[in-house]
Amino acid sequence: MVQASASALPQTFDEFLNWEPTDGYKCEWNDGELIQSSGKKKKQYFIYGILNKLFFKTGYIVKGMLMAEPDVMLTSIQMRRPDIAYFTYEQTERGRQGEDVIPAFVIEILSETDQAYRIEEKIAEYFKAGVQVVWNINPEHEVVYVYTSRKNVMICLENDVCSAAPVLPDFSLTVNELFAPSVS
């Protein structure tokens, strides 16, 4: 639901790039369409924390970083904000120089407002742009969908292992570890 008046919403991609929403929504741009979502909630930040801890533990911090809600230009008319994305340090340097870079691994933490057709649309866009691994995490049902292509998906429950291979081969954990982590 749009909180601002229609005249306050951006009408072009250039307007979108210079626009700051004031209604608390996270916004993406897809070929002339403004797409709003509610952004991350407490449970989603907790999941991000667990994944960040795993990222440090596996040593991938020496190669790159996990970013929360980065602006990712999939095409010249398509800007998405995955909940979490992995970028190498070389990519972040290229991004700092103004180049659009595509993460090899993205994570979407689904909420009750996400619509199935929008989720499928994003998966298709990510793979078309060059993303190699997509995780769709559904915290309400404690399930993780691990995609390595639009056709190859593993549905992970309970003790099933979710892996970011081939991008980050050692970045893996079970669904139970993700949703019921130890205090240590």
Image: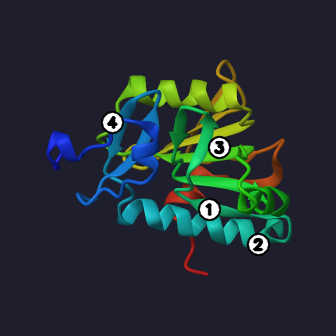
| Marked residue nearer the N-terminal end (3 or 2) | 2
Q: CA distance from mark 1 to mark 2?
A: 16 Å
Say which residue appears at 54% left-offset and 31% top-offset. Answer: 77
Which amino acid is tagged 2?
Answer: Lys
Label of residue 11 in the image: 4
Which residue bears the numbered disc 2?
A: 57
The disc placed on residue 41 is none
- The Cα–Cα distance between marks 3 and 2, rounded to whole angstroms, is 20 Å
Label 1: which residue? 67
**Residue lying farthest top?**
151
Mark 3 crowdedness (10 Å alpha carbons): few <14, some 14-19, many ≥20: some
Residue 160, label in figure: 3
Q: 10 or 140, which is in the foreground?
A: 10
Badge 3 vs badge 2, beta-carbon distance below 8 Å:
no
Name the mark nearer the viewer: 1 or 3: 1
Image height of 68 relative to 135, above or below = below
User: Which tag, 4 or 2, sits closer to the chain's start?
Assistant: 4
Q: Earlier in the sequence, mark 1 or mark 4?
A: 4
Residue type (three-letter) at the residue carrying disc 1: Met
* Secondary structure state at the residue bearing disc 3: loop
Q: Nearer the viewer, mark 3 or mark 4?
A: 4
Above or below 74: residue 19: below
Label 1 vs label 4, nearer the camera: 4
Q: Earlier in the sequence, mark 1 or mark 3?
A: 1
Mark 1 touches mark 3? (CB < 8 Å): no
Q: Quadrant of the C terminus?
A: bottom right
Q: Find the distance from the CA under tag 1 to the CA under tag 4.
A: 28 Å
Residue type of the residue flagged with mark 3: Asp
**Disc 1 residue crowd, few under 14, some 14–19, many 20+, Cα 10 Å:** some
Quarter that holds the N terminus: top left
Question: At x 43% / y 59%, what residue is drawn?
Answer: 44
